Amino acid sequence: MRGFREFSPMLYTLVLIGVIIEGLLPRDSAAALPRVPAEFSEDGRMAVVQTAGDLAIWDIEAKTLAGKVPQIQCDQVRFLKQDGWVLCAGNGVTIYDWKRQMAVAKIPPEGKQAMRVLAYSREADRMVVRQGNEAVSVWHIGDKLIPLKHIPLDAEKDVLSAAASPDTKTLAVTQGRKILLYDLLGTAVRDMVMKDGHPHDLLFAPGSPILAASIGNTILLLDTEQRTIHARATLTSAEGARGRLVPRVFSLDGSRLVAGNGQWSYPVFEVESGRLLALTEFTYVDRARGARSNIQLHTADISDDGDHLVGQPEHPSTLQIWDLRTGTMLPDLCGDECRNMGPGVGLLRWSPDGSKILVEMNGGRNAEVAGKVSVWDVSTRAPELVLDPSQPQAKILAKRAPPPSPHAAGSSAPSAGSAFVHASALRTMATSPTTNLLVTTGDDGLLKVWNPGKGTLLRRLKLAAPASALGFSADGTILAVGTAQGEVRLWDTRTWREFPPYSSRQGQINALQFLPGNRLLAIAGEQPKVSIVDLNTREVVKELLHMSASESCDGKGCVRKRSTQAEAVLTLAMLDGSPFLLTASQTGQVAWDIETWTEIDRPAGFPENWSGLGWRRSYLATTARTRNPMASALTVWDPRRNGPVAGLDRFTNGDTEVVEKGATLALGASLAVDPLNRWAATRVGEQVSVWNLEDQERKKTFSVKMPYYLHWTGDGKHLVVSTLDRKVLVWSAETMEPAHFLLDPAVTQ
């Protein structure tokens, strides 16, 4: 029998987070993590599963039953550092050497309440154990158990939650409005008083002093070293808040937090700011009523990196996977063979690398896996092994072909010659500020939704008239589409359920811009006014008349003259976090204070000319003069400091021009900064460059034929470049190379 390999520190951290979360969740919750105790080893080669009265240890790689621990019932299991050792927590904590078939050590219970392991550090070979509301103890494992610390808990003060840091150096315990912070390597005890209410559901981030604590519909992200509130993460009623938010899993790097919103949805928050990045809601179409309804999950498990969730919804009763980063539902883990099994799933557990899932189900149409524990391959959506502890060998099931992709556009780079995204002219495009979605529109009347990083076409939507404007809400959950006939159509990007359309009576829509809160939408069309529409009441709450100012010069100098007539607005934009709405016509720009709806000449901190505004955009794009009077420089501007961040490409008008079929085309220059402020992309004519903003170093330059729009994806990993000939190039910031052209196989010319 082959022992498991040394655990990698990164995978250790992932599994450890799962252990902490499992210890904090109520065991009878329908959406709680697995009810049947099971765990993968950190290299994914071994698995331990609680069966009827026994612990079964499986070598997944060799497909054999490696060993058994008979006549034992565990509430929590995990592999330890020592080869062949597993831990069982429940009525006490027992460590078994399954290779030698003997108990190594045991911590007897101190009372009637079950014991839980809050954290285990492989590096220190140390664990933190909680005995209900009675005590928390720290133990060094080694060759034998050595008690290091015993912390009595005051049961009369109702200890609701306790969590240990992954390195087992810090313990956090709630008592009333306080969070007590124990130094587990010393004697210091500090406290944090929560003025907002009683904290619950503590969870430490990996590799940082950040501690998550839920209070009502808010999660406080606390800096335990500074004892300050680092950020607040919350859901509003408009975003689907359904009660108390519960922290579930931090991402590997601690930058994202997955939370539970009851049993109805899972929001993902940015730890640095508390901003909502994505929201996964569980819904189904009730065909009898012709409506979409919310549903709950019976059993669920989150992947160790916090990217995906697998669960069994009420309707249909199958096993489904969701991408938590985008809020989208992926192809079923199992389809018809799992339907009509009722709430029969008792175990779901992701492997550390996310390639396999342990499943224990009762019912369903597949007799080979019904009533048994099986190992499913995520890529093929099929069961591979059946783990029957009465047999020495796992049963190997017949392989299935991978499920066909609904769209043929793969991630490999097709040739640019035939990589068209629309059958006729590409009108406009937009990237979601929070998820990796790209939307394109063309004169063919189609709206197309893409995953630009993977190069896949996700869906096509047919419009009655071609779309002429696009606008995402700040959280990316709503897409507004303006058409050439003056209609505004609205979609929920999580479910692609369409809301009732709005008729603007403005002719062709030129631009759309959500205001903060998702309720108000600014609409600019052919009429010389901008309508501010309340999407709930469908009433126009404000109309803005854009009258730009232009310079008039004579021999004595130049003066700015205000236009006497309102002009049609061509673009709308906002700077994230500011109260300013920008309207722009052919002759000039006007800034509006949306709190007072007054016009201002130029917001404080803004340069003379600016662009590049948008959600998750804290910097502006501008052009600066150089010592050469004929040249300009693309510049990144910080309005908070009222100064430039970086001066990038220098160019003249001649640099922006290209000759195409004998005619000279002025392509101009543009600049786009990624949402994480790491990279800036510049375009001068047909030359595109990517810059590292920190050191202002040009990392790569490449040529694109007739480029137009520059957009970054929501995660800043890909630059999207559209061209005037209906092509879209996706460029990877990770490889510093072009990744692929987007391709709709239905478009051949």
Image (spheres, rainbow, N blue to C red):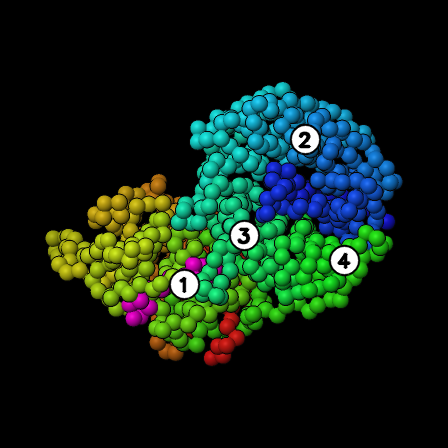
Query: Would residue 194 be counted in the magenta stretch?
Result: no
Amino acid type at mark 1: Glu
Residue depicted at x 29% and y 51%: 581
Residue indicated by mark 4: 386
Numbered disc total? 4
Mark in the foreground, 4 or 3: 3
Q: Is residue 306 left or right of residue 686?
A: right
Residue indicated by mark 3: 296
Amino acid type at mark 3: Gln
Residue depicted at x 57% and y 55%: 313
**First in sequence: mark 2 vs mark 1:** 2
Mark 3 crowd level (few <14, some 14–19, many ≥20, 10 Å Cα): some
Q: Establish if 302 lies above or below 284.
A: above
Mark in the foreground, 2 or 1: 2
Alpha carbon separation for disc pair 2 and 3: 30 Å
- Kindly tell me whether residue 391 is visible in this rendering: yes
Q: Is residue 131 left or right of residue 641?
A: right
Please report the bounds of the magenta region as a residue range: 483-498
**First in sequence: mark 4 vs mark 3:** 3
**First in sequence: mark 1 vs mark 4:** 4
For numbered disc 3, what is the local secondary structure? loop
Alpha carbon separation for disc pair 1 and 4: 42 Å
Amino acid type at mark 4: Val
Of 47 and 582, nearer the camera is 47
For numbered disc 4, what is the local secondary structure? strand
**Percent position of residue 631, x then y:** 33, 57
**Percent position of residue 474, x then y:** 39, 51
Which numbered tag is attached to residue 498? 1
Q: Is residue 447 left or right of residue 345?
A: left
